[in-house]
Amino acid sequence: MLIKLTAFDLSLAACLVLLLALLSWKMQLLITRQLLVAGLRTTVQLLLIGLVLKSVFSNVNIAWVIMITLVMLSVAGWEILSRQHRKLKVWWGFGISTASLFVSSFMVTLLALTTIIQADPWYHPQYAIPLLGMLLGNTMTGIALGMDRLIQTAWQQRMIIEQRLMLGQTSSQALAEIRRDSMRAGMIPIINSMAAAGIVSLPGMMTGQILAGAAPVEAVKYQILIMFLITSGTGFGVISVLWLMSRRLFDERHRLRFDQLLKQV
Amino acid sequence: MSVLKVSQLVYQGCGPVDLAIEAGECIGLTGESGSGKSLLLRAIADLDEHRGDVLLGDVNCKSVAAPEWRQQVALLPADSQWWFDTVGEHFNATDTELFQRLGFKPQVADWMVSRLSSGEKQRLALIRMLASQPRVLLLDEPTANLDRQNTTGFEQIVADYLATHNACAIWVSHDREQLQRITHKIYTIEKGRLNLC
């Protein structure tokens, strides 16, 4: 049984958001504009991607799939960059975050498509694009958090890092605790959501499948697959971002070089 | 042959600097703030980019890995940094006999860093630096925050170390009297150039 949503159904839900906007305007909570803009954006963006997916699904072509995934990848890369508190040099920041997203999402999606899901053809957009989208969206958060923690903590503790270098530690030793801390910061959200899944929260993807009429156990199996893919993707992604960032943070003589990474030092 | 030899060293727009220090020798360096004293020490420890050559014996800085170099050519800043909670975590297990030799009880390893006085902290920072048995000590206003008694203790440790380890030192200070008391030669630094007093 699949109950299709009508435009009227969606308008009802939109009314709730409008009501909230009205209330927050009355109470001067200074969120009205952002709320309306974001609501508008989500409607337009999702409708557009719906149309794009519709035409891509009916016309399976690897060139289209590659193009869409590259757009998704670079937008996610920019998103990570814009979530950093310290302004990174644009090309380095973008390069490092996209490279890590590539490891975390592309490789994991590729592996899942070719060995686990095995659609025909393996790049069939009905599987490839939603899967990549889910991985990008989730690993992006972890990578952005890990990157931000590394650069912020290293900046605050730059005196300590230099002191450790003075004592003859390698750049890797001098950064060991900070790296550990950043890894934790990047991984905690996904570890928490794995721990809470099914008890505190029903994950969105599974809920969506069930609402759309799938058998719960089938939906659960997909959700478990997704969880594992997201977790490993996030982990590999955060590790690559830490590795790339800590290499760039020092020069070949183990000197702390924020000027190589940050816009203003 | 001199222990440390600096030739045509250009760093951060200062220099060129030429300097040679013999075993057991301690030279003093003084000059106004911003004259490039600290930067010179940082360049010698290879913490900043520089041109020219720095040699330890006949080994050029460029030919050794930077961490190894800094264990041999050790820099002590005016304010030491500590990153673990207790003193002992900053030392190897084998270093603890150094505590006793330098006037601390072995229990000092369990002390909290946050409870140390500035004198204790600076003496412990010196011990921590000496643990790697450096040949060159670069001391950047090491006693600026210490009282007279702690200063004397600090000077004593350095003098003993230089005498027993064939090492040498560059001691940066604003205190001319102190430099005359403990160093063999005093240089003033002006716009990054050295002049013997």
Image: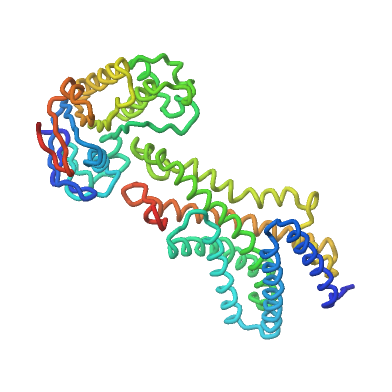
Please say if A14 is above or below A145: below
**Residue B131 to residue A48: above or below:** above
Name the quadrant containing residue A132: bottom right
Q: Residue at x 59, y 71 (%)?
A: A72
Does any portion of residue A177 appear in the rendered image? yes
A75 sits to left or right of B118: right
The structure residue drawn at horizontal position 41% and vertical position 14%, both measured from the top left corner, is: B105
Left or right, residue B75 beside residue A37 = left
Q: How many numbered marks are there?
A: 0
Q: Looking at the picture, how far across and down is residue A223, in whole percent?
A: 74, 60
Q: Nearer the viewer, residue B31 or A126?
A: B31
Residue occupying the point 16% across, 38% down: B189
In this rendering, would A134 be left or right of A235?
Answer: right
| Closer to us: B171 or B136 | B171
Can you give x and y, in whole percent of width and height, for residue A218 in the image?
Answer: 81, 64
| Residue nearer the viewer, A46 or B177 | B177
A124 shown above or below B112: below
Residue shown at 32% from the left, 41% from the top: B67
Counting from the top left corner in percent of width and height, residue B134 is at 27, 31
Determine the image quadrant of residue A135: bottom right
Where does the image place residue B101, in percent across and percent down from the top left? 33, 15
Tell me where residue A244 sits by quadrant: bottom left
Residue B45 appears in the figure: no
Quadrant in which the N terminus of chain A appears: bottom right
